[in-house]
Image (cartoon, coloured by chain):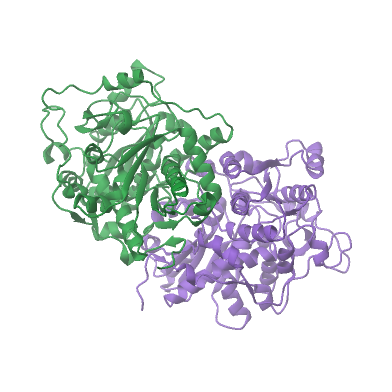
Chain colours: A purple, B green
Amino acid sequence: MKTIPYKLMLEENEMPKAYLNMKAFMKEKPEPMLNPGTLKPCTAEDLEPIFPKECVSQELNDTDKYITIPEGIQQFYKMYRPSTLFRAYRLEEALGTPAHIYYKFEGTNTSGSHKLNSAIAQAYYAKQQGLTHLTTETGAGQWGTALAMACSYMNMELLIYMVKCSAMQKPYRKIVMETYGKEVHASPSNTTNVGRKILAKDPDNTGSLGTAISEAVEASTTFDDCRYALGSVLDQVLLHQSIIGLETKTALEKYDVEPDIMIGCVGGGSSFGGFVAPYMADKLEGKKAPKFIAVEPESCPTMTRGKFAYDFCDVGQVTPLAKMYTLGSGFIPSPDHAGGLRYHGMSPILSKLYNNGDIDEVRAVKQSEVFKAATDFCKIEGILPAPESAHGIKVAVDEAIKCKETGEKKNIVFCLTGTGYFDMAAYKAYNDGIMVDKKPTSEDLEKGFAYIPKLDGIQ
Amino acid sequence: MKTIPYKLMLEENEMPKAYLNMKAFMKEKPEPMLNPGTLKPCTAEDLEPIFPKECVSQELNDTDKYITIPEGIQQFYKMYRPSTLFRAYRLEEALGTPAHIYYKFEGTNTSGSHKLNSAIAQAYYAKQQGLTHLTTETGAGQWGTALAMACSYMNMELLIYMVKCSAMQKPYRKIVMETYGKEVHASPSNTTNVGRKILAKDPDNTGSLGTAISEAVEASTTFDDCRYALGSVLDQVLLHQSIIGLETKTALEKYDVEPDIMIGCVGGGSSFGGFVAPYMADKLEGKKAPKFIAVEPESCPTMTRGKFAYDFCDVGQVTPLAKMYTLGSGFIPSPDHAGGLRYHGMSPILSKLYNNGDIDEVRAVKQSEVFKAATDFCKIEGILPAPESAHGIKVAVDEAIKCKETGEKKNIVFCLTGTGYFDMAAYKAYNDGIMVDKKPTSEDLEKGFAYIPKLDGIQ
């Protein structure tokens, strides 16, 4: 057996040269997105006014198992990748577990998370097409920061709609995006029709990702040579994020490690989808595969308590409909601290995989328990995790403790999606003992479900 | 010639196994620290009530060229090191320079800077000695965060005095240290005699590193099994930081790169001293060496406008006296944004080397120009630098532009000591165009110099 270092590193020339297209491995494909006007499956022509052409082509591609990463994108990846896969020796020791714990850490770039992987791809494809502007929304701010960085790299303009409660909780996030030279509006804003309509009804609305998406999509139509970029949920985003899983697999195989359990947080599902991609592809081809556990907050329980149905991706109902686990586009989660996991829907690919039983388990966890795991982790392993990422830590630790009880020496691998430097107000609430766990009641959920459109004969 | 990747990485087993003790290479040694009571050179007995024993032994050691890094410290280093040495391909392209630019990036650990290298060593040696507590001061907050992390690793208690204006400018820094379970007081505080005395005279005093040091040293005497830790200036700290330079040299030699110019910021001098250590050792042994340029802020011009004299390391005048470049222990720099470079003194080793002409140049730069360099750098290279670190960027860019003018293809290597995630208020001031450059007048300097003690026959 090889000695495993603290950091299982790869050379730049060992990085993936192609993305893995999980959809091409699926026998039952996810249901197609629907044009909200005609309720017919979206065509490239429907989507190209919204997204860059190459992104549309990737979104609709369910046949090519691998899609080459252009040299231009590979160059940018080399500025901050391969990301480090850590062996958590100290955490194992602290838990007294026979399990081996590994984590793929996506947080060392300035944007602080995995989001940069797709931001660079989307900005690159937009630039190649001759576009000059992008618009986007951001919740916790990690996607907005990532796209701001990527657009700086590509010399592109960017307009960002940041969910208002996040913009208030994280003023410094906004300044980072501005430092990259980009424009940021708190959403709902009075710069779009959708925003003005929401504010007229409810001036104190603190926003949601769904609202911010509506505004960004609307704004993208007001510039020439402008398109919209989305940081999660879409099939293309999971495709780009497959680089996480591909690197993880290459690094683990170098040291002859087979994962038994793979764990990650899910908001829109992009980091988890990318992280498990090559192992899920193995499973779909009938090969041996680890157990897959996705983790979501109890306060926004999309997969554990949502419906598997066609729904809008935004509050304004201007986007295509997707068949996914959803709490309803009008569901307003409590403005708690894991901002990146507050989306009402879920990646259609992951939704389909979960519905088919290919994702073994989704676990909903309490915020206070997540922060306890985060705080313990930072004391032991040194890294201060994003609250979102800490959902994965919480379950990885639970699984490692189970191994202690059973004596099983499992390989537990989780994705540590990012850092919590801009979440210190949330940590303070936890440190001060004033963090409250919120869980929607059945009534809250019913209110959200009422937003799910009734589509006769389609559901 | 070998193709140089974006990141010149080392394996964990290529990491240094011994620190480089620059002092042992110096023919003219730095003047000894003096006991403030007797004005005689400090002995181990003088220093051991203040610092852990092994640290004292290192502080006084000017004969051993290499000092073994204990296995226990090496294990902690492997959790976040080797740090990445980047080739700045995009910056070179943006500047259109024939120069090759490299930077050693110390900012990927949660503490956000190189400070962790010495924090781990000092906490480790304290723990080995059976101590249970440490006290320290912190200016910008990077050292405090680093020691908080290190003490978490070692299960030690820690009491931190944070310069009041920094604590106000960077509330989130304080929360990070508290998240590691450590206690933080804004200094001057009413928890020490020195602090109470200062506040009685001037209740609005916003503090200085010198004041915070006095409080931390005093507090260290109030616990049993407690010592004091300092994050810069001391010889032992430069010794620990030599790991930066040793890694840099190993990585550059792997790719047959000889640096022509080495650049770094100086506050107390620890990162610069560690960064240049092995190359300076070459120079002191008569071998070929690069040009060394240290960079300091115009607002705290310790080396360019200070005096080379024996002075106290703190405001309260309780610490030993050191022969160094100094602006006087009572010098109050403007509360500007490069918090980590506001110290009145300078490493005695670097002071001696500069006085002897072994450091080729010290350049004082304007804050607004530093922030311009920082902002440009983050747009081009992606990394958001600490304001302190950006002093090095500013001069590296200036030197690269000179190469463009002369056509010289120099290898410029600078130390990017840390990240600016907790400095966004300063970035906002720059973005908003309200940053003011401050430069002490000759009168300001004279006021500071008046604090330098007159020591008959010693100066």
Residue A106 in the figure: left or right of residue A195: left
Front in this rendered view, residue A368 or B23? B23
Q: Quadrant of residue A241?
A: bottom right
Front in this rendered view, residue A169 or B22? B22
Residue B415 in the figure: left or right of residue A310: left
| Residue A326 image position (x, y, % from top left) | 73, 59
In the image, residue B307 sits, relative to residue B106, either above or below, namely above
Most extreme residue toward the bottom is: A286
In the image, residue A16 sits, relative to residue A325, either above or below, namely below
Q: Residue at x 51, y 55 (%)?
A: A107
**Tally of numbered discs:** 0
Most extreme residue toward the front is: B406
Q: Residue at x 29, y 28 (%)?
A: B306
Q: Residue at x 80, y 66 (%)?
A: A44
Residue B108 in the figure: left or right of residue A447: left
Q: Is residue A433 visible?
A: no
Q: Quadrant of residue A165?
A: top right
Q: Is residue B429 visible?
A: yes
